[in-house]
Image: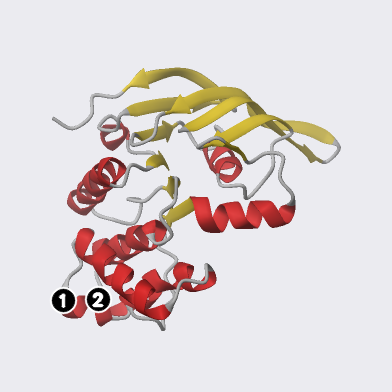
Amino acid sequence: MLTVTNVSRTFESGGVEVEGVVDVSFTVPTGQFAAVVGPSGSGKSTLLCLLGALDKPTSGQIEVDGEMITSGTDRQLIQYRRNMIGFVFQSFNLVPNLSAVDNVMLPMEFAGVKRPERTARARALLDQVGLKGAKQNRRPGRLSGGEQQRVAVARALANRPKLILADEPTGNLDSKTGKAIFTLLHDLARSENTTIVTVTHDLALAGKTDLQFEMEDGRLIAPKQAVGRR
């Protein structure tokens, strides 16, 4: 479960204090898929950075599966990002000179998983996200955008994270492929019992998640119960 309590983040710009996130509180239960929507500059990306321990809030608390991530040392936060968080980016962020399976194995290598185990898990994850056979041995440049994003999703799952954060995961994809990726994330939240939070501008896709949170000027507007997939 993800629990965010009274989180704020302020920045100083030219001697002026700027409020990036203001007193935000919400909960996403384990196994649910939530979307954060809002116009550019509303605080969505700042919030995602805070959830991923890429930045620290000025005040408030963030808790993932009972672990407080807002009060740890830098070393503890590195371990948190490695072991408890999976990231999916709009631009895929795959290593271009590594095959799909090697990209998925990479986080496990950093976590000290032995090669036979990480190879087997990487191939199983790629199968799970729909990238099968010879395509697993291709480099990203020989895969379509949708296939690259499937590799990125598999990589995010590599270390069995408690929370997956997806930053505009369909932004570089056509509408059909984008819907397929959203469906995949929705299914994975259930099958992997993982909490997933995505930032998206696509309100139609956001409406198909379990929960939808709307931000405006750094503040959270009342959360909506999304319709989900039928």
The answer to whether residue 192 is visible is yes
Element under disc 1: helix
For residue 44, the mark is none
- Location of the N terminus (image quadrant): top left
Residue 203 higher or lower than 186, as above or below? above
Residue 216 higher or lower than 139, as above or below? above
Q: What residue lies at 21% left-to-right and 54% top-to-bottom?
A: 177
Q: What residue lies at 28% left-to-right and 63% top-to-bottom?
A: 125
Q: Amino acid at mark 1?
A: Gly
Contact check, label 2 and label 1, Cβ < 8 Å? yes
Q: Nearer the viewer, residue 184 or 218?
A: 184
Give the CA distance from mark 2 to mark 1.
Answer: 6 Å
Label 2: how many Cα within 10 Å (few below 14, some 14–19, many 20+):
many
Question: Where does residue 217 sit, x and y in percent of width and height?
Answer: 58, 26
Q: Which residue is mark 1?
A: 133
Q: Is residue 109 left or right of residue 11?
A: left
- Locate residue 145: give its quadrant: bottom left
- Location of the C terminus (image quadrant): top left
Residue 95 higher or lower than 154, as above or below? below
Q: Which residue is mark 2?
A: 136
Question: Where does residue 107 sit, x and y in percent of width and height?
Answer: 47, 67
